[in-house]
Image (spheres, rainbow, N blue to C red):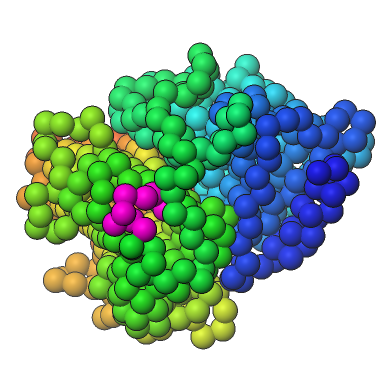
Amino acid sequence: MTQAAIQNDVNAIYAQQVTNEMGTARYALLFEPGTYGSQSAPLDIPVGYYTEVDGLGQDPSDVVINGGVTAVGMNGSGALDIFWRSVSNLTIHVVPVAPGDCHTSNEMWAVSQAAPMRRVDVKDFTTFMPYCENPNFASGGFVADSDLEGGALNGSQQQFYVRNSNLGTGGWSNYVWNQVFSGDINAPAQDFGAGAAYTTLAQTPVSREKPYLYIDGSGNWNMFVPSPQTNSTGTTWANGHTPGTSIPLSKFFIATPSDSVSTINNALSKGLNLLLTPGVYNVNSPIKVKRTDAVVQGLGFATLTATSGNTALTTADVAGIDISGLIVDAGPVNSPVLMQIGTKNGNNGVPHNQPSDPTGLQDVFFRVGGPHVGKATVSLEVNTPYTILDDLWIWRADHGVAGSVGWTVNTANNGLVVNGDNVTATGLFVEHFQQYNVIWNGNGGEVIFFQNELPYDPPNQAAYEHDGVLGYAAFKVADNVQTFHGYGMGSYIFTNVDPSIHVSHAFEVPNTPGVQMNDLLTINLSGPGTIDHVINDTGGPVSSANSDVASQVVSYP
């Protein structure tokens, strides 16, 4: 394609998607290996809602953009709602579209939840703050397996997680409340407490990068599945090709929204993997993933909507399944569970001493309400041990189309329930659920970065309390759990329906030596609502009397 044709397509999609927050259009912009744009004629790729921008090389260096891939805020809200978009597997040389142009003078990826940057090499400075806007707020991002060679500006980002990346000679500047780093080169030093906000782990204990499409030297399309890593630092591609396995695209069923669940399941039962092309898939029964090492990937934020009170996707008790790039929406009939990983009382596939082939979820996002009425008791239930949850936003909507949001409308008890042992979450965002946002029942769990907002809309305290406890903790580690470790975990409150709402504690854990929590905080978000304690009965309150000031607990017990 000519650059003019590419730019015209990009601009037309962006014009449609820039304000299409609750719409149904979905796009993947895939760039074959090569160089796009130049110093004198840059290619500017603004990215709107439900738009994925990917290079199709085996390495990020195979696709070079001279220009920028930009996600920007909107005047009036900054980047607080810049959701559901992504960029991956390419190199960016920043070239402004015009001298002094604010949005394109640096690589600007000013986003909030569900907007990952993966496998990107930025040769220049990167900003995650929408500094061109007024206000210029931003509320949480995720970067993995990337090289930000010129360094990065956090700026107004309230919380952010960077994993297995190189932050370049410029490093990372600024913090607000909760910035977490694991396995990063040139990360800021550990500095949490007394108002500081950096949590830094030298290595990421376990990780599994998201699979990606690429075109090989013979022009064949493949899906590359990176190998799992333990105790890792830096990018997977710093010293050559990413280790892993290449699967020809001929071994995938390439689905469209017109394909029935039975058609998809029939393909899966024949041993094919599943690639869901962009669109909204209305599913009235679950997609069933049963084969060891099966790969399920959505392109362009492909969306599964449970239409009949069903589960949208289930997996069998086998090892190594990988699910990525999906949105899962609740429908108007209550679903007990939207996605179930392993059976609740099965053998759960992986022997407890064999974690070499973990199940992985990357960039999987859940919604209850927002684009339409949705109801789900639990959004995600994880029963398979050694599962890796990498960049999940599980959201009971606090805003959406008219009539889709309300205490008795988009009902949802829990966002995430973990029953399996040795489950790890690297980048976990769970918000607004009506009871515990997260219940963790498994032993050996680990969470590196957690972001939560408690529900805005309890109508009164009587509707939001239990067993003599005010409200519900954001994160509940079950009383019988013996081992768990959490790092860099925050919970925020803003209760605008009833300003008198109290929550007794944001985190509840058993008092046992094997349960260790580090770098916890609570925040009152410039308004009504009170959290009395950070964890159990430890940590001071946050309320309108000290809004936007973190109450911190450096370690517990």
- x and y percentages locating residue 536 in the rendered image: 21, 52
The stretch drawn in magenta includes residue 125: no
Q: Is residue 70 left or right of residue 313?
A: right
Q: Nearer the viewer, residue 230 or 518?
A: 230
Seen at 25% across and 44% down, the residue is: 292
Indicate whether 220 appears above or below 236: below
Is residue 89 visible in the rendered structure shown here? no
Does 270 lie within the magenta span? yes
For the view shown, which residue lies furthest in the top direction? 239
Residue at the image position 44 percent from the left and 32 percent from the top: 246
Q: Nearer the viewer, residue 511 or 5?
A: 5
**In this picture, residue 134 sits left or right of residue 89:** right
In the image shown, does 130 or 402 lie closer to the viewer?
A: 402
Q: Is residue 341 left or right of residue 169?
A: left
Q: Is residue 131 above or below residue 77?
A: above
Res. 321 image quadrant: top left
Quadrant of residue 469 within the rendered picture: bottom left
Q: Which residues are magenta?
A: 267-274
Quarter of the image with the N terminus is top right
Image coordinates for residue 299, horizontal then vertical, percent = 54, 53
Between residues 398 and 219, which one lies in front from this camera angle? 219
